Amino acid sequence: MKLYVSGIGIWSDLAQDWEQLKTALAENSDTDPAGIPRSELIPRAERRRAPKTAKLAVEVAEQACRMAKADMSDTASVFTSVLADTEISDNICRALALPQKILSPTKFHNSVQNAPAGYWAIGSGNHSPCNYVGGFMESWALALIEAASQCLIEQRDVLLVNYDIANKAPLSDVCQIDESFASALLLQATCTQKDSVELELELCAGSHPQPVAQSISARTLSRRNPSAAVLAQLEVFAMKTDEQNATELRWPINSDAHLRIRSWGSL
Protein backbone atom coordinates (compact mmCIF):
# COMPACT_ATOMS: atom_id res chain seq x y z
CA MET A 1 0.00 0.00 0.00
CA LYS A 2 1.29 3.44 -0.95
CA LEU A 3 -0.16 6.70 0.35
CA TYR A 4 0.82 10.13 1.64
CA VAL A 5 0.92 12.02 4.93
CA SER A 6 0.08 15.67 4.24
CA GLY A 7 -0.69 16.95 7.72
CA ILE A 8 0.40 16.25 11.29
CA GLY A 9 -1.07 17.37 14.60
CA ILE A 10 0.58 17.04 18.00
CA TRP A 11 -0.16 17.94 21.61
CA SER A 12 2.10 16.99 24.50
CA ASP A 13 4.30 18.46 27.18
CA LEU A 14 7.12 18.30 24.63
CA ALA A 15 5.40 20.26 21.83
CA GLN A 16 1.99 21.62 20.87
CA ASP A 17 2.26 21.56 17.07
CA TRP A 18 4.38 19.96 14.36
CA GLU A 19 6.90 22.79 14.00
CA GLN A 20 7.50 22.82 17.76
CA LEU A 21 7.95 19.06 17.75
CA LYS A 22 10.55 19.13 14.99
CA THR A 23 12.55 21.67 16.98
CA ALA A 24 12.14 19.73 20.23
CA LEU A 25 13.31 16.48 18.63
CA ALA A 26 16.31 18.13 17.01
CA GLU A 27 17.35 19.87 20.23
CA ASN A 28 16.37 17.12 22.71
CA SER A 29 14.25 19.69 24.54
CA ASP A 30 12.91 19.17 28.04
CA THR A 31 9.17 18.82 28.56
CA ASP A 32 7.11 21.68 29.94
CA PRO A 33 3.58 21.01 31.27
CA ALA A 34 1.10 22.02 28.57
CA GLY A 35 -2.17 20.95 30.18
CA ILE A 36 -5.21 20.06 28.09
CA PRO A 37 -6.03 22.26 25.06
CA ARG A 38 -9.22 24.34 25.02
CA SER A 39 -10.21 22.99 21.59
CA GLU A 40 -12.11 26.03 20.35
CA LEU A 41 -13.56 23.92 17.55
CA ILE A 42 -15.87 22.24 20.07
CA PRO A 43 -18.93 24.48 20.66
CA ARG A 44 -18.89 26.22 24.05
CA ALA A 45 -21.94 24.36 25.35
CA GLU A 46 -20.34 21.01 24.48
CA ARG A 47 -16.85 22.05 25.59
CA ARG A 48 -17.92 22.43 29.22
CA ARG A 49 -18.66 18.73 29.51
CA ALA A 50 -16.22 17.38 26.93
CA PRO A 51 -13.68 14.93 28.44
CA LYS A 52 -9.94 15.46 28.23
CA THR A 53 -9.61 12.76 25.57
CA ALA A 54 -12.03 14.61 23.29
CA LYS A 55 -10.25 17.95 23.69
CA LEU A 56 -6.91 16.34 22.90
CA ALA A 57 -8.24 14.42 19.91
CA VAL A 58 -10.10 17.37 18.40
CA GLU A 59 -7.09 19.69 18.82
CA VAL A 60 -4.65 17.44 16.94
CA ALA A 61 -7.23 16.48 14.30
CA GLU A 62 -7.83 20.16 13.54
CA GLN A 63 -4.07 20.84 13.37
CA ALA A 64 -3.53 18.01 10.86
CA CYS A 65 -6.42 19.13 8.64
CA ARG A 66 -5.29 22.75 8.61
CA MET A 67 -1.72 21.78 7.79
CA ALA A 68 -2.92 19.66 4.84
CA LYS A 69 -5.56 22.24 3.82
CA ALA A 70 -8.10 19.42 4.04
CA ASP A 71 -11.86 19.93 4.39
CA MET A 72 -12.58 19.10 8.03
CA SER A 73 -16.27 18.57 7.27
CA ASP A 74 -15.59 15.91 4.65
CA THR A 75 -12.71 13.85 6.05
CA ALA A 76 -13.17 10.28 7.26
CA SER A 77 -11.46 9.44 10.55
CA VAL A 78 -10.07 6.61 12.64
CA PHE A 79 -9.49 7.20 16.35
CA THR A 80 -7.33 5.03 18.58
CA SER A 81 -5.77 4.86 22.04
CA VAL A 82 -4.14 2.37 24.38
CA LEU A 83 -6.61 2.70 27.27
CA ALA A 84 -9.26 5.22 26.10
CA ASP A 85 -10.77 7.47 28.81
CA THR A 86 -9.42 6.04 32.05
CA GLU A 87 -10.44 9.10 34.08
CA ILE A 88 -14.14 8.61 33.39
CA SER A 89 -13.90 4.83 33.73
CA ASP A 90 -12.29 5.28 37.13
CA ASN A 91 -14.96 7.79 38.19
CA ILE A 92 -17.81 5.46 37.19
CA CYS A 93 -16.24 2.45 38.92
CA ARG A 94 -15.75 4.44 42.12
CA ALA A 95 -19.37 5.62 41.99
CA LEU A 96 -20.60 2.06 41.58
CA ALA A 97 -18.60 1.02 44.66
CA LEU A 98 -20.58 3.44 46.85
CA PRO A 99 -23.88 2.45 48.51
CA GLN A 100 -25.85 5.09 46.59
CA LYS A 101 -24.41 4.09 43.19
CA ILE A 102 -25.18 7.54 41.73
CA LEU A 103 -23.87 7.80 38.18
CA SER A 104 -23.52 10.99 36.18
CA PRO A 105 -25.42 10.68 32.85
CA THR A 106 -22.88 13.01 31.24
CA LYS A 107 -19.93 10.93 32.39
CA PHE A 108 -21.62 7.74 31.22
CA HIS A 109 -22.28 9.38 27.85
CA ASN A 110 -18.57 10.31 27.58
CA SER A 111 -17.27 6.93 28.76
CA VAL A 112 -17.66 5.16 25.40
CA GLN A 113 -14.51 4.81 23.34
CA ASN A 114 -15.87 6.70 20.34
CA ALA A 115 -16.85 9.79 22.37
CA PRO A 116 -13.89 11.85 21.00
CA ALA A 117 -14.97 10.95 17.46
CA GLY A 118 -18.44 12.28 18.29
CA TYR A 119 -17.07 15.58 19.55
CA TRP A 120 -14.93 15.85 16.40
CA ALA A 121 -18.02 15.30 14.23
CA ILE A 122 -19.96 17.96 16.15
CA GLY A 123 -17.17 20.53 16.11
CA SER A 124 -16.18 20.08 12.47
CA GLY A 125 -19.70 19.50 11.12
CA ASN A 126 -18.43 16.19 9.78
CA HIS A 127 -20.86 13.47 8.62
CA SER A 128 -18.20 11.22 7.09
CA PRO A 129 -17.44 7.72 8.41
CA CYS A 130 -15.53 7.58 11.69
CA ASN A 131 -14.60 4.65 13.88
CA TYR A 132 -12.42 3.61 16.79
CA VAL A 133 -9.74 0.91 16.88
CA GLY A 134 -8.50 -0.46 20.19
CA GLY A 135 -5.59 -2.89 20.41
CA PHE A 136 -3.77 -1.98 23.64
CA MET A 137 -0.04 -1.48 22.88
CA GLU A 138 -0.51 -2.23 19.18
CA SER A 139 -3.38 0.26 18.77
CA TRP A 140 -1.59 2.82 16.59
CA ALA A 141 -0.28 0.33 14.02
CA LEU A 142 -3.65 -1.44 13.79
CA ALA A 143 -5.45 1.88 13.38
CA LEU A 144 -2.99 2.91 10.66
CA ILE A 145 -3.87 -0.23 8.71
CA GLU A 146 -7.57 0.61 9.03
CA ALA A 147 -7.08 4.25 8.06
CA ALA A 148 -4.80 3.43 5.12
CA SER A 149 -7.26 0.82 3.83
CA GLN A 150 -10.12 3.33 3.89
CA CYS A 151 -7.94 5.97 2.27
CA LEU A 152 -6.88 3.79 -0.66
CA ILE A 153 -10.08 1.82 -1.22
CA GLU A 154 -12.36 4.85 -1.08
CA GLN A 155 -9.80 7.31 -2.50
CA ARG A 156 -10.50 9.90 0.16
CA ASP A 157 -8.68 11.79 2.92
CA VAL A 158 -8.62 9.96 6.26
CA LEU A 159 -7.54 11.22 9.67
CA LEU A 160 -5.70 8.93 12.06
CA VAL A 161 -6.02 10.29 15.62
CA ASN A 162 -4.09 8.78 18.52
CA TYR A 163 -4.36 9.83 22.19
CA ASP A 164 -4.14 8.82 25.85
CA ILE A 165 -4.45 10.77 29.10
CA ALA A 166 -2.62 10.38 32.41
CA ASN A 167 -4.16 7.78 34.73
CA LYS A 168 -3.95 6.71 38.37
CA ALA A 169 -4.30 3.57 40.49
CA PRO A 170 -5.76 1.02 40.17
CA LEU A 171 -5.84 1.43 36.37
CA SER A 172 -2.21 2.54 36.39
CA ASP A 173 -1.32 -0.88 37.81
CA VAL A 174 -2.22 -2.33 34.39
CA CYS A 175 -0.57 0.39 32.30
CA GLN A 176 0.88 3.49 33.90
CA ILE A 177 0.45 6.75 31.98
CA ASP A 178 2.08 9.79 33.59
CA GLU A 179 1.16 12.55 31.15
CA SER A 180 -1.23 13.17 28.28
CA PHE A 181 -0.31 12.85 24.62
CA ALA A 182 -2.10 13.10 21.27
CA SER A 183 -1.12 13.00 17.61
CA ALA A 184 -2.91 13.00 14.26
CA LEU A 185 -1.97 12.19 10.67
CA LEU A 186 -3.89 13.32 7.59
CA LEU A 187 -3.58 10.50 5.04
CA GLN A 188 -4.18 11.01 1.31
CA ALA A 189 -4.33 8.56 -1.58
CA THR A 190 -2.73 11.07 -3.95
CA CYS A 191 -0.27 13.85 -3.22
CA THR A 192 -1.93 17.27 -3.10
CA GLN A 193 0.74 19.23 -1.21
CA LYS A 194 4.25 20.34 -2.16
CA ASP A 195 5.54 18.96 1.14
CA SER A 196 4.42 15.48 2.12
CA VAL A 197 5.72 12.12 3.28
CA GLU A 198 5.14 9.07 1.10
CA LEU A 199 4.41 5.81 2.89
CA GLU A 200 4.75 2.23 1.70
CA LEU A 201 3.00 -0.22 4.02
CA GLU A 202 3.37 -3.99 4.06
CA LEU A 203 1.99 -6.64 6.40
CA CYS A 204 4.72 -9.09 7.36
CA ALA A 205 4.76 -12.41 9.20
CA GLY A 206 6.62 -12.81 12.47
CA SER A 207 6.81 -10.85 15.68
CA HIS A 208 8.87 -7.67 15.94
CA PRO A 209 9.73 -5.30 18.80
CA GLN A 210 8.27 -1.82 18.83
CA PRO A 211 10.53 0.88 17.34
CA VAL A 212 12.33 3.19 19.76
CA ALA A 213 12.73 6.91 19.17
CA GLN A 214 16.25 8.25 18.67
CA SER A 215 15.99 11.49 20.65
CA ILE A 216 16.22 11.31 24.43
CA SER A 217 13.21 13.59 24.89
CA ALA A 218 11.03 11.40 22.65
CA ARG A 219 12.12 8.20 24.40
CA THR A 220 11.38 9.75 27.79
CA LEU A 221 7.90 10.81 26.71
CA SER A 222 7.25 7.35 25.22
CA ARG A 223 7.99 5.78 28.59
CA ARG A 224 5.51 8.15 30.25
CA ASN A 225 2.72 7.54 27.73
CA PRO A 226 2.62 4.45 25.45
CA SER A 227 0.72 6.38 22.75
CA ALA A 228 3.80 8.56 22.40
CA ALA A 229 5.67 5.58 20.93
CA VAL A 230 4.50 7.05 17.60
CA LEU A 231 7.24 9.67 18.08
CA ALA A 232 9.66 7.11 16.64
CA GLN A 233 7.73 7.35 13.38
CA LEU A 234 7.28 11.12 13.56
CA GLU A 235 11.05 11.52 13.93
CA VAL A 236 11.39 9.82 10.56
CA PHE A 237 8.76 12.09 8.99
CA ALA A 238 10.83 15.10 10.06
CA MET A 239 13.82 13.89 8.01
CA LYS A 240 14.40 14.96 4.42
CA THR A 241 14.91 11.78 2.40
CA ASP A 242 14.25 10.50 -1.11
CA GLU A 243 12.98 7.05 -2.10
CA GLN A 244 16.51 5.70 -2.58
CA ASN A 245 17.26 6.60 1.04
CA ALA A 246 13.89 5.69 2.49
CA THR A 247 13.68 4.91 6.19
CA GLU A 248 12.09 1.69 7.39
CA LEU A 249 10.42 0.96 10.71
CA ARG A 250 8.53 -2.16 11.75
CA TRP A 251 5.57 -2.03 14.15
CA PRO A 252 4.11 -5.08 15.94
CA ILE A 253 0.40 -5.72 15.43
CA ASN A 254 0.20 -9.04 17.31
CA SER A 255 2.45 -11.90 18.39
CA ASP A 256 2.59 -13.33 14.85
CA ALA A 257 2.72 -10.31 12.54
CA HIS A 258 4.03 -6.77 12.15
CA LEU A 259 3.60 -3.75 9.89
CA ARG A 260 6.56 -2.61 7.80
CA ILE A 261 6.57 1.14 7.04
CA ARG A 262 8.95 2.63 4.47
CA SER A 263 8.81 6.40 4.21
CA TRP A 264 10.50 9.23 2.36
CA GLY A 265 9.98 12.94 1.80
CA SER A 266 9.44 15.43 4.62
CA LEU A 267 6.96 17.80 6.22
Image (spheres, rainbow, N blue to C red):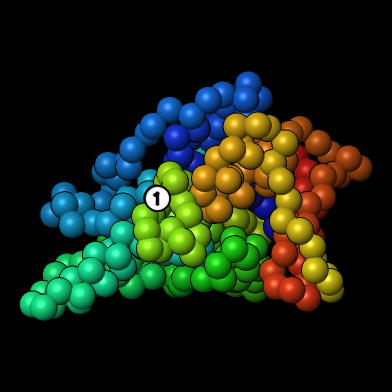
Horizontally, residue 139 falls left or right of residue 258, namely left
Against 227, residue 204 (above or below) is below
Q: What's the residue at 56%, 71% (across, down)?
A: 135
Q: Is residue 120 above or below residue 247?
A: below
Q: Front-most of 138 and 57?
A: 138
Which element is circle 1 on? loop
Rendering coords of residue 156 (x, y %): 57, 64
Residue under label 1: 166
Most distant residue in the left direction:
100
Q: Nearer the viewer, residue 52 or 131?
A: 52
Asked whether residue 215 is in view, the answer is: yes
Q: Which quadrant is the N terminus positioned in?
A: bottom right
User: Up-down: is 76 above or below 234?
Assistant: below
**Residue 104 position in % (x across, y down):** 14, 70
- Direction top: furthest residue: 27
Can see residue 182? no
Q: Residue at x 46, y 61 (%)?
A: 173
As drawn, is 187 to the left or to the right of 116? right
Q: Residues within 10 Å of mark 1 (few under 14, many from 20)?
A: some
Q: Nearer the viewer, residue 169 or 181?
A: 169
Q: Quadrant of residue 34?
A: top left
150 relative to 207 in the view: left or right: left
Kindly identify the residue that appears in the image at 88 percent across and 40 percent down. 245
Q: Position of residue 44 (x, y in %)?
A: 16, 49
Q: Quadrant of the C terminus?
A: top right
Q: How many marks?
A: 1
Q: Position of residue 207 (x, y in %)?
A: 80, 68
The amino acid pointed to by label 1 is: Ala
Q: Residue at x 84, y 73 (%)?
A: 205
Q: Which is more toward the observer, 259 or 117?
A: 259
Taking 115 as reference, is 191 left or right? right
